Each structure stands twice: as C-alpha cells, then as structure tokens.
C-alpha cells in the first residue's frame, strides 16, 4: 500500500518509519524541515510513567490564580474563534476524577508501548540523540499539591505504572545534588527512577536520514493546498507547486494545523494548539547541572539534561496560532532555571524557542480513521505535551488501524 504521511515532526516521522517496517511504500510531505514545529525544542522528557493529564480535578481550585495572575503558567487570550471556546469548555468538563483516571490509564498503556518501540528502534538504528535514563523528580511547592500528587502516584501504581516514591525535599536533593543550591523551598517530590530524556529534534533528523536511505519520498518545503477526492475517498493531495501526490491512504500528522486540514476534508477534530516555550543553555562542563530530569509542577516547567546542554521548557498558552517567541516568557524560563540551578551555566546563550503543542481536551490523542470524512483518511494527532513520549506507540496504533 502507498501511504502519504502529512507532517515531518516526531509523530509523522515515527509513523512513516513504522509503516515502512511493515512493508508499505511511504511519501512524507511537510511545508518545512523535520522537527520545525513542536518537535524542535520541546521539553525533551520521555515521561513514560508519570503521565498526569492537564485536565485534572485540581485545575478548578487553581483556576482563578491561573487565569488572573500575571505570572501564571496558564494564559488564555480570547479569540473570535468558536473552536477555542468549544475546546476550553470541553477541557473544563474533562477536569473530573473519572475522566482523569480513565485518561491516565490509557496514557500509561500507550506510553509503555511507546517506550518498548523506541528502545528497540534506538538499538536497531543506533540513533545518537543524547538519550539518558537517569530518572525524574516532580517538585511540589505546597503541602496540598504534594498530597494530591501522592494520590496520583497510588493511582498510577494501581494502573500498572512503574515503581515511584514520594520523597522529602532533602531526599530529592540527595537524589539530584544540583538541587541543593535552589533558592526557593518545596514541600516534596515524586521520584520515578525509570524516566528518560532525549533530544527530539535529533531523533527526527535521524529518522529522516534513515527513511531517505530506504528510498521513501520525502517532500520538504511543500505546502498542502487541497484534497482531491472521488466519492468517499481522497485520491490525492494538491501541493503549492501544483503537483498532486496520489496514494492509497493519507495520514494527517500535522500538529497544531491538523484541525483545519481535517475540517477541509469534512472531519471535525477537538485539537487546539497549546503554546509552549523553551530555552537551551550550555552546561559549560560544570558538575552543578542536573543529571536527573526535573519538573516544577507549580510553574509547569520541565528541565532535562541533553549531553552538555540543559533544556528548560514550559508554559501553557491558548493564544490561537500565534507562534511568536515572547521575550517576557523566555525571561521567566531563564529566571526559573537560574533559581533552581544558579551555577549550572553561564547563561550567556539561552537559545529561545516557542512551539504549538496540539492537544485534545482530555489529553488522549486521536488515532485512526474517523466516523466522518473520507474512508482512507487517517489521523494521528493531539498528543499535546506528551508528543515525544507517545509518538512511537501512536505510530504502532496508527499502522494497526490501516490493516
């Protein structure tokens, strides 16, 4: 079967790789280079065993502060866009214990599958991507948030998650000595020894090289313009240069633009972009940079070591398609990084970045053929902040749906 994959981020490229593994002929189309979108500067954490969804019952108590505080990690800029308001209302409806537990269970299953597939891929292809398996600490700054995290830890264990432990601030500093110099106190942390980190952009670039060597048709710098249909099927996609690419099946993996492209084919998707930011700093070879991945739950900022670099990423902004890098948010990231790790870098070059993470209201991705729209159009999107974590498991599920 000839499959056209639209999108060359981590979701699209992992999908293309899985399809070639199963003997399909694949064409990949993207308007930019691999990892040009959300895959390029993401948080780098592979959060296989700590998958608490953003749509959590605790959001209700935090909502006034999240919406009104100038320093809030969550920002909503209302748009004249019914899609935004519909998504927000669906998100709030999903902030209940039953939905959160259901989402957690499904994410853990998908993440476990993704870990297995990515581990096998790295071993098979010898991908250099600054991979590490040094564990993760999620820090909580209040007793209440720490108590809620311990409950989530119990739930994840009951659902088959890996062993985790609740540790005091002192114990967290013993696990990651770089935290000893932090300037702000925290109540405790959840430690997951099995968590990993890697450079998603390097993975994407490696996958593109591997796929090209296998002879797949990688069409970069090509804008999607239209669907060409016949009856209830897509027969081709029209590109900006006037060319049409025909295929037996088409897979949309275009990140934050997926809802608009799907809608043009008659498929409505509850996917909205959550804008995030990151900085990447050189650790200057200093021993005071963390080895363990860190998540500051209050600020919604994650930290991951990538070789001789430290990546800090975070923020959740619902601001439509505005992908501009805002200096104030970059400054917030730098200040938060220096507050936790004041001596890990000279902070001379912070490499600012912003990206749009495609998210569903529940946090569960949309994978496979949909009830409406063309019968040979498939979706693989909506992984949100867990895009890198879930990419390879999502690719397997998508490939299964093509069978």
Image: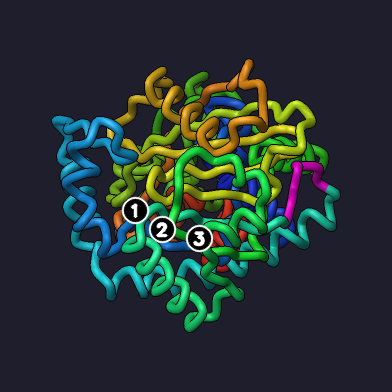
Helix, strand or loop under label 3 = strand
Q: Nearer the viewer, residue 322 or 263?
A: 322
Mark toward the viewer: 3 or 1: 3
Mark 2 nearby-residue class (10 Å; few <14, some 14–19, many ≥20): many
Mark 3 crowd level (few <14, some 14–19, many ≥20, 10 Å Cα): many
Q: Which residue is pictured at 41% across the width and 18% down the height?
A: 327
Instruction: Read off the residue under disc 1.
Output: 360
Dot label at residue 243 = none
32 left or right, relative to 97: right
Q: Is residue 258 visible?
A: yes
Taking 34 as reference, is 177 above or below it? Answer: below
Q: Which residues are magenta?
A: 127-133
Per the image, the residue denoted by label 2 is: 366
Mark 3 and mark 2: span between their CA atoms?
31 Å
How is colour applied across the structure in the image? Answer: rainbow
Looking at the image, tell me whether mark 3 or mark 2 is earlier in sequence order.
3
The residue shown at (61%, 53%) is 173
Residue 56 position within the rendered picture, expressed as x and y whole percent measured from the top left: 30, 62
Apparent side of residue 287 relative to residue 141 in the rendered image (left or right) = right
Distance of label 1 from label 2 (alpha carbons) = 8 Å
**Would you say the residues marked 1 and 2 are in contact, meaning their CB atoms lie under 8 Å apart?**
yes
Q: Which comes sooner in the sequence, label 1 or label 2? A: 1
The residues bearing labels 3 and 1 have C-alpha atoms spaced at a distance of: 28 Å
> Which one is nearer the viewer's eye here, 352 or 393?
352
Q: Residue 1 appears in which quarter of the rendering?
A: bottom right
């Amino acid at each position: 079967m000839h499959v056209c994959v639209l999108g060359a981020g981590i979701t699209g490229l992992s999908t293309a790789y899985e399809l070639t593994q199963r003997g399909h002929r694949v064409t990949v189309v993207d308007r930019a280079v691999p990892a040009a979108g959300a895959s390029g500067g993401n948080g780098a954490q592979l959060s296989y065993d700590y998958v608490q969804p953003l749509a959590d019952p605790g959001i209700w108590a935090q909502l006034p502060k999240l919406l009104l505080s100038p320093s809030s990690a969550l920002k909503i800029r209302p748009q004249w866009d019914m899609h935004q308001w519909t998504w927000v209302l669906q998100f709030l409806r999903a902030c209940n214990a039953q939905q959160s537990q259901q989402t957690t269970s499904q994410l853990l299953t998908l993440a476990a599958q993704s870990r297995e597939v990515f581990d096998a891929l790295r071993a098979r292809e010898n991908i250099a991507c600054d991979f590490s398996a040094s564990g993760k600490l999620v820090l909580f700054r209040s007793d209440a948030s720490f108590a809620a995290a311990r409950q989530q830890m119990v739930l994840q264990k009951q659902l088959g998650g890996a062993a985790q432990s609740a540790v005091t601030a002192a114990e967290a500093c013993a696990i990651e000595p770089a935290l000893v110099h932090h300037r702000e106190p925290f109540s405790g942390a959840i430690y997951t020894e099995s968590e990993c980190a890697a450079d998603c952009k390097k993975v994407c670039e490696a996958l593109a090289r591997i796929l090209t060597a296998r002879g797949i048709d990688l069409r970069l710098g090509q804008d999607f313009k239209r669907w060409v249909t016949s009856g209830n099927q897509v027969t081709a996609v029209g590109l900006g240069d006037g060319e049409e690419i025909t295929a037996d099946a088409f897979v949309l993996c275009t990140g934050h633009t997926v809802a608009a492209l799907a809608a043009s084919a008659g498929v409505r998707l509850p996917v909205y972009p959550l804008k995030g930011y990151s900085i990447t700093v050189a650790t200057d070879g200093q021993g005071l940079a963390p080895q363990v991945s860190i998540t500051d739950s209050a600020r919604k900022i994650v930290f991951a070591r990538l070789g001789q670099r430290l990546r800090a990423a975070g923020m959740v902004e619902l601001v439509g398609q505005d992908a501009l890098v805002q200096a104030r948010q970059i400054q917030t990231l730098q200040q938060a990084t220096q507050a936790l790790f004041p001596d890990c870098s000279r902070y001379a070059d912070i490499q600012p970045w912003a990206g749009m993470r495609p998210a569903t209201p529940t946090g569960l991705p949309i994978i496979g053929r949909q009830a409406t729209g063309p019968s040979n159009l498939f979706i693989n999107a909506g992984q949100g902040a867990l895009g890198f974590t879930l990419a390879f498991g999502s690719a397997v599920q998508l490939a299964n749906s093509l069978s």
